[in-house]
Structures are given as C-alpha cells and as structure tokens.
Image (spheres, helix red, strand yellow):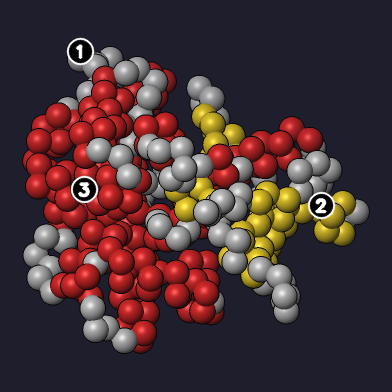
Amino acid sequence: MLGYYLIITNENFQNIFIKHLEELHQELAGLNKQDYLKLIIKTWFVTSIFHDCAYSISTIEQWLGSYFAIAPLSLPLPLVVNLNKIWVQYEREKVILTRMIANSACIPDEDVAEILKEMVIEASEKKGREPDHGVIGSLILMKALEDLREEQEEVMRREACCAISLHNKPVFEEIKKRGPKTKMFNLREQPFSFLLVFCDNVQEWGRIFKATDLIPQKLPKLDSVIFERPQSKSGPEVIVVKLCYKGTLGLEDQDRIRNNLAIPTSTWHALSELQFRVHLLHAVNNEKQEFDRGAWIDYPILQEN
C-alpha cells in the first residue's frame, strides 16, 4: 500500500516511472500518461504481491531441519531440496532476466548469469546460506505469466520480475561489486526495484529477525506508521516514513532496528529532486521521542554529471 500511495499521489514519481518505461520499452510509444499510469500500477501490484512468493522454497531445508532436530523422530537421510532440477526448467526465463538486469546495471550478461546461478545453486550447496528467494521467485513468476501476449503485459512481466530478482541484499551488493563505479542502483534507472527495496525494508513491523534453537526473537512492535511530504517552495521534494515503536526501547533494540533499515542505503540512491528518509521514534513517558542516536536514515543522493 505504501508503494501504491506514493505512485498515485506523487507526480514526480509518476514522471520518473514513465521516463524509465519510455526509454527501455520503445514498443510503448504512443501511450498517453493515463495509460502509462495504469501500467505502472499493474506492474507495482504484481511486484509487491509476489516478491516473496518463493520464500518458502529458499528456507524449506532450514525449517524442516530445525523441526526434526527437536522432534522425537529420526530420519535416515538429510532433508535436501534439489534446486538444480528447478533451475534447469527456466532456461528461457533466465535469458530474459539476465538481459534485463545487465541492461539495468551496465554489466555483461555473463556476469549476471553467474551471479544468478551463485545466488541459487551455489548458495544451496553451502551450509548455513539460503538460496535467494527473490531470484527463484522471479523465474517462477516469469514462467507463470508466460501466456501474457499483449505488449503492455509483457512489459509488466519483465519489469516486475526484474525488480523481484534485485530486492535482496546479496544480489544487489554482488551486482554492485561488478558494475561500473559511476553506475549506482538508483530511483531513476531502476524505479520499480528502488520502490520495492524501500517499501520492503521499512515494512518490518514485528518481524522475526533471528531464531534461537527453540524461541524466535522479534523486533519491537510498531505503534504507528506515518507518511509525510514536507512542503518546500524552493527545495527538493522529500518523502518521509515515520516509524513509531511501542514502548521505550533500549539502545540495543534501537541499533538493531536502525542497522536493519539502513541496509539498502549502501547501494540504492535517491535523486536530488526526490529524496527518501526514514524517521525513527519510540515512546518515552507516553510521548513520542526520537531514537537516542541515529533517528534519521537518509537514502544517499545519486551524483549525476
């Protein structure tokens, strides 16, 4: 809903999406702004709804292994999901996804193909590392939507799947390492990906962040989420998401929340004309107060020549 709200209420945002689609998909030439907006909303709907559709596949071995480790049962064989058998079923989808990411990040197709394979196959073979559910989910979704025939539907399929494949830290950080230093992931060139990363990251209310042997630990619960767009006649437009947590949080919880929310800011960049901030507060004596340190998280601004 946050992404939908930002799209329909922000003309700057709409224009960034439209310019991206115009430049990357020439088959859309001739669409008016209203048609572009419908396509953007449809694409965002698919992206946001299905971005974690493969999460269970990437974590099934860990879940089952943890369950049977404490259950009064003995298994003759280890629980293994053979992702190689899944991987080879998506050759055409891998080619399309590889080309989309390579164009977006300005790195060779071969590097992207290697990264995608590393995130799924090699990750599954390394103990303690989950295969990337974004990459797996994007391939599954792309195949599920392969019967879409209209040009706009094909654009929606490709843009949504590309955004889903890039929304996890291991993928976008590995691509960043191999790409040109002047070419950062940013709102202008990867608007669907940027919006998914931003919304997915600020939406962490009470989620489990680490599991012990038996008891999962959770981040503190949110009391409210407030969206602000401070008005400025001369300065840039700034979008602020204010996260207000329940109760008074200790420094350890504050640091954990801030560090979790700041992960994308090492890679993803906003624009000088449209900036993004997260404001962190908690309750002290029943009043909302800023975190004791690091109450503001700013997405860095893309430095353009």
As helix, strand or loop, the secondary structure at mark 2 comes to strand
Q: Are marks 2 and 3 in contact (CB under 8 Å)?
A: no
Badge 1 density bin: few <14, some 14–19, many ≥20, Cα 10 Å = few
Image spot of residue 177 (x, y percent): 42, 31
Reply above or below: 99 against 215.
Answer: below
As helix, strand or loop, the secondary structure at mark 3 comes to helix
Give amino acid for label 3.
Arg
Give amino acid for label 2.
Glu
Residue at the far right in the pictured view: 285
In this image, 17 relative to 107: left or right?
A: right
Image spot of residue 67 (x, y percent): 37, 27
Q: Which residue is mark 1?
A: 76
Q: Which residue is mark 2?
A: 290
Q: Which residue is mark 3?
A: 99
As helix, strand or loop, the secondary structure at mark 1 comes to loop
> How far is the residue under mark 1 from the one under mark 2?
54 Å
Can residue 238 be seen in the rendering of this structure?
yes
Q: Are marks 1 and 2 in contact (CB under 8 Å)?
A: no
> How far is the residue under mark 2 from the one under mark 3?
44 Å
Image spot of residue 28 (x, y percent): 23, 75
Q: Nearer the viewer, mark 2 or mark 3?
A: 3
Q: Nearer the viewer, mark 1 or mark 2?
A: 2
Residue sitting at x 56%, y 51%:
303
Q: Are marks 3 and 1 in contact (CB under 8 Å)?
A: no
Badge 3 density bin: few <14, some 14–19, many ≥20, Cα 10 Å = some
